[in-house]
């Protein structure tokens, strides 16, 4: 664990601006001499800081401190309720997401990238092509498990991430949300306990609520991710039926578990024979460095139910996702069938078309660098405009920020006024079933930056100042 100690030490130096933004860290050999560790420990520490969103590797030049890395402290780790709780009141989310469809609203509230970030032309071309070439197929159902060519592309993509998955194991769904719901239906009964990160994506709480499950929330470190110690304790104390985690770039914190910690997590789950529903929807979107491996890539026992979709990379409007169940694909197919009968056929074929082109990886790389700039700019503006002592996350991937305000301000109480003033945000209370995080909010950075956004942020800053 030496590398994490070195990473923490270097993080303090970055926080204190001993290494300010834009500056190169000493090379890994130098670091190893200075801190009396091996070169591989120094390399691992730099990679860990890359995952924490603090360093950026530049080919042949070394590691540089990210522009967004300093000035503000990250949000604090919270202790949460130690007993499982039923989830209720998640209907509030609908009001928030409905606001996203209002073109007059500055949408900082939902994690939906503005169209400017998305390859709209590529998608349009793919749709035209499938309608031209496969129109008879487009007007029919494409029953579960979904279009074979799409399942082949997903399996190939997962193979490139070191997951041993064949096309027969892939089920096409209409979203990551549906994949998660099906996976949880496969492995739980009403009343069961499922473990979630805290804060966690509200959509996961909604599924837990809908299925009548109980949520047990595990504290999550804003830089290192989920606390494995707390998870171990939970698994020893409760009859946990499943875990639902976002190990690569969680929402809302944007943290990514290291490979080592992902393997530790899997070992722990294997020991207790508890399935993991892995939500990898943001895995493609590191803000720097390589795309992380999913936990699924180490799974040899069929314990991981892998869920993802094209919502954050290509278009949320496509409504195409996928599920690789750890076990019992036939049951998953049937559950998908009774939910939606068939996923939109033209969308499945168009997505297969996009994935077929070698340009896909280039598209994603371009998108990651756009998201990286958008996140850095938002951090910069929020740290300038929001009250002093505001804490801001340093996402290692994805495009949302988690902001913790000083004092006792309740962000839920300010939401209505903000929406009336034309700007939305996601209040912190939505991200837990325990009523925690009242003084926090999540902000979407993937917005088209213009004077309206600047004005919206200013309005928000005023409203959130006690
Ligand atoms: C972590 C996470 N999982 C799942 C989803 C839902 O994605 P989809 O549009 O594929 O249902 C989201 C959307 O914001 C998300 O942030």
Image (tube, grey):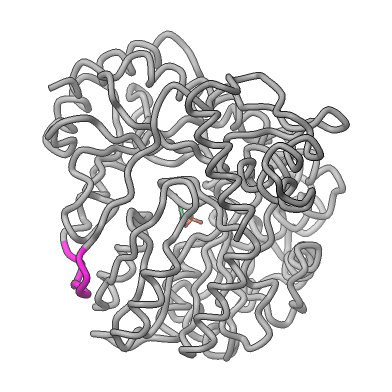
Residue 281: tell me if it is visible: no
- Relative to 65, residue 280 above or below: below
Left or right? Give the position of 255 relative to 349. Answer: left
Image quadrant occupied by the N terminus: bottom right
**Residue 228 x, y percent position in the rendering:** 45, 68
- The quarter holding residue 50 reads top right
Residue 84: tell me if it is visible: yes
**Residue 360 x, y percent position in the rendering:** 78, 46
Left or right? Give the position of 316 relative to 131. Answer: left
Q: Tell which of 460 and 130 is nearer to you.
A: 460
Q: Tell which of 429 and 77 is nearer to you.
A: 77
**Residue 407 x, y percent position in the rendering:** 15, 31
The answer to if 87 sits in the magenta stretch is: yes
What span is colored magenta in the figure? 81-88
Residue found at x 65% / y 19%: 22
- The quarter holding residue 345 reads bottom right
The answer to if 45 sits in the magenta stretch is: no
Image quadrant occupied by the C terminus: top left
**Residue 241 x, y percent position in the rendering:** 37, 85
Residue found at x 57% / y 61%: 308
Magenta span: predominant SS is loop
- The quarter holding residue 434 reads bottom left
Q: Tell which of 457 and 136 is nearer to you.
A: 457
């Amino acid at each position: 664990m030496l590398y994490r100690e070195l990473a923490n030490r270097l993080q303090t130096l970055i926080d204190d601006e001993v290494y300010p933004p834009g500056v190169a860290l000493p090379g890994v050999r130098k670091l190893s001499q200075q801190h009396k560790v091996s070169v591989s420990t120094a390399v691992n520490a730099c990679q860990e800081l890359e995952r924490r969103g603090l360093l950026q590797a530049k080919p042949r030049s070394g590691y540089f401190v990210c522009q967004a890395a300093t000035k503000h402290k990250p949000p604090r780790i919270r202790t949460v309720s130690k007993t499982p709780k039923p989830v209720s009141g998640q209907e509030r989310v609908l009001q928030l997401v409905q606001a996203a469809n209002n073109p007059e609203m500055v949408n900082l509230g939902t994690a939906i990238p503005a169209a400017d970030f998305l390859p709209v032309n590529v998608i349009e071309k793919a749709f035209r092509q499938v309608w031209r070439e496969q129109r008879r197929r487009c007007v029919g159902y494409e029953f579960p498990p979904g279009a074979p060519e799409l399942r082949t592309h997903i399996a190939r993509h997962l193979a490139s991430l070191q997951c041993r998955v064949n096309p027969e194991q892939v089920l096409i769904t209409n979203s990551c949300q549906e994949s998660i719901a099906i996976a949880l239906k496969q492995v739980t009964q009403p009343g069961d306990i499922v473990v979630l990160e805290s804060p966690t994506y509200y959509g996961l709480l909604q599924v837990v609520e809908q299925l009548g499950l109980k949520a047990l929330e595990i504290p999550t470190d804003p830089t290192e991710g989920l606390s494995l110690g707390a998870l171990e304790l939970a698994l020893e104390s409760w009859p946990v039926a499943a875990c639902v985690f976002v190990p690569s770039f969680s929402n809302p914190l944007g943290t990514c578990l290291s490979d080592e910690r992902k393997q530790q997590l899997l070992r722990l789950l294997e020991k207790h024979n508890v399935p993991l529903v892995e939500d990898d929807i943001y895995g493609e979107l590191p803000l720097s460095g390589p795309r992380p491996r999913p936990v699924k890539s180490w799974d040899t026992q069929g314990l991981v139910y892998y869920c993802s979709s094209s919502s954050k990379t290509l278009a949320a409007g496509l409504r195409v996702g996928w599920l690789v169940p750890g076990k019992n694909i036939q049951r998953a197919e049937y559950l998908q069938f009774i939910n939606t009968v068939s996923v939109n056929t033209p969308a499945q074929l168009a997505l297969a078309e996009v994935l077929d082109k070698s340009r896909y990886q280039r598209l994603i790389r371009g998108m990651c660098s756009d998201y990286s700039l958008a996140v850095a700019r938002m951090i910069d503006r929020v740290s300038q405009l929001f009250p002093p002592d505001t804490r801001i996350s340093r996402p290692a991937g994805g495009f949302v920020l988690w902001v913790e305000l000083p004092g006792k301000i309740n962000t839920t109480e300010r939401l209505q006024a903000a929406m009336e003033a034309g700007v939305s945000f996601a209040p912190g209370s939505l991200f837990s079933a325990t009523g925690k995080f009242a003084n926090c909010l999540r902000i979407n950075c993937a917005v088209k930056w213009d004077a309206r956004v600047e004005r919206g942020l200013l309005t928000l800053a005023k409203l959130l100042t006690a």
